[in-house]
Each structure stands twice: as structure tokens, then as C-alpha cells.
Amino acid sequence: MSATDKQLAVGVPIYSRETALRQFLESVPSYVETAYVAENGPPDDRDRDVYDRSWPFSLDVIALEHDDGIGACRAAIVDTCSEPYLWVGDCDMAFVDGGDLRTLRAILEAHSDLGGVSGWLLEDRAVRAGARDLETVGDSAIKEASGVDLEHDPVPFARFDFIPQAGLFRTAIYEDYSYDPDVRSTEHFDFFYAHRQLGAWDFASTPTVLIRHDRNINAEYRESQRGSGHVDRDILAEKWGIEHVEPGARADWATVHDHGLKSDAFNLVKQTTPAPVWVRLKRGLERVGIA
């Protein structure tokens, strides 16, 4: 592991799904310096065998109060992280071939105005970007991804206000605004809307890095958090004057099912991506039956 690689860390919350956490940790590349796990599960369900295993990176488990919420988990990870680059995601994700975090870091290093960059998500034989801009119309925030301009240094990417929580971030951006620990389940929107309002950082998405996302693993936990939605809505209304978050006519940069390599988006990436990067991307798609 080089000294430069030691700048990289990853961080995820966990509530109860040890299987998901184990799969995630087993996928973390060996060049990562630290994996931060924010533990907010039931007190009698935290003696996890996965914590006792030997890993090729440092494992830092952060103990929170039971069911503190995702916002508190992400805020705790940010407060604990000492590396300059932090990948933020969820334990129902996994890194696959074509998911090299060093590619994301290379984009950030080439563009000092970028605060974070995400890869695309592999979900149930589909690929989606999860990237869009945010427009304020009255008391509504509209998610819209139109008029995308592709940049190519060092690999293809596009800029957006809002990207998935599957991205690598400069930890310096958290000095301007971090995750609100009081926002239990919509911390994602709160974080990016705040940075849009501040205007200090841009964010980006690249299809040259893939992250596997198993939406079924944590479905039970996500359902249990729906009851906190009214509390989050009150917070967002008080902070930003936002009462509604709605999709626009095109609410995502790209959502590609099954034969995604035939889509315009992937053809464009294939034409402009350096061959070694494209080979890793295609291999990752083949592993999950898409290519």
C-alpha cells in the first residue's frame, strides 16, 4: 500500500444486518486505510463476529445510542475520520470489479472545486446513476437531470447538485456543512441541498466506477424508518423552507436495464473512456449479468 492510498477511508452505518456488513467489508479494497462502522443497532445485538476478524485495513467501530438514525451515524463517521478522503455509503453496498476508489480520487485531484464524486449503482440487473440537480420552486425542491455536460479529465464524469451516498468526498467539505444528526432518514437530501445553497463545492458522477447495491438486504430497516419522515419534514421546512421534494421530468442522469451497454450513455462512455478503465467497467457488468 502506498502512502497516497492511505489517504482513503470508507464509512457505513449498521443497524442489524451483520450479513450485509460482512459482505461489504469483504469487498473493501486492501488499499483502503480505515473502514468506519457506525453501530446504532440494539445493544444486545452488537457482539458481531465480523468485528473480531482480521482485515487488511483498520476497522474502527463507532458505538452510538440505539436507533440514533442514519444522520447521526454519518455525522459520527465524519467526526471520527482522520483521512482526507472518505467514501460514504451503506452496508448493503459492495465494491466490485470496476469500482476502484482511486479513480474517484483521481477525479477529485484533477478538479479542486469538486467536493465529492460518486460511481454508478448496480441494482437487480440494472444500472443507475442516482445523480441529478436540485431546483427550488416555491416550497418544493425538484430533482432534475437535464442538459448534462460530460467532462473527460481524467475519465468521463458530469457535475450535479445531488449524487448517491456511494461517493468519495474530500473531508474538507464537512467544515462547511456535515450531516445533521437530528435528520434521521433524509440526511442525504439535507446534506446536498445545504451545499447547493452554500455554493462552495460542486459534485459529480462517473459511470467508470461501479458499486453493487442490494436494495433487499436493508428493506426491513428502511421500512422501519418511514415513521420518522414527519420529523425530518419539519426540520427541512424550518431549515430550508422546503415542504416537498419531487422528481422532475428526468429525475436521474441514467437508469439502464439489462442491455445497458447498448444505451447512448454507455456508448458515449465506451468511446471516451481509456481502455483499461473500460475493461474494468465491462468486467463488473459481466459479473452481475448485465453485459
Image (cartoon, rainbow, N blue to C red):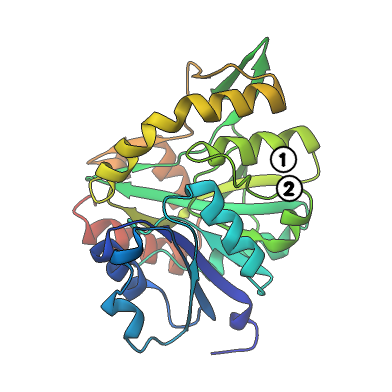
The residue shown at (48%, 16%) is: 249
Asked if residue 115 is positioned above or below residue 268 in the image, the reply reads below
Q: Residue 64 — which label? A: none
Q: CA distance from mark 2 to mark 1?
A: 7 Å
> 201 or 90, which lies in front?
90
| Left or right of residue 47, residue 228 in this image | right
Q: What is the residue that sits farthest to the front in this orientation? A: 44
Which of the 4 image quadrants contains residue 171?
Answer: bottom right
Q: What is the residue that sits farthest to the top in this orientation? A: 138
- The answer to whether residue 144 of the structure is visible from this angle is no
List the residue tagged with mark 1: 195
Three-letter amino acid code at the position of disc 2: Tyr
The residue shown at (59%, 32%) is: 148
Other residues around mark 1 within 10 Å, as few (<14) / some (14–19) / many (≥20): many
Dot 1: element: helix
| Left or right of residue 51, residue 164 in this image | right
Label located before the other in sequence (2 or 1): 2
The residue shown at (32%, 38%) is: 224
List the residue tagged with mark 2: 177
> 125 or 269, which lies in front?
125
* Residue 69 in picture, x, y percent from top left: 47, 47
* Residue 232 in picture, x, y percent from top left: 54, 30
Asked if residue 11 is positioned above or below residue 48 in the image, the reply reads above
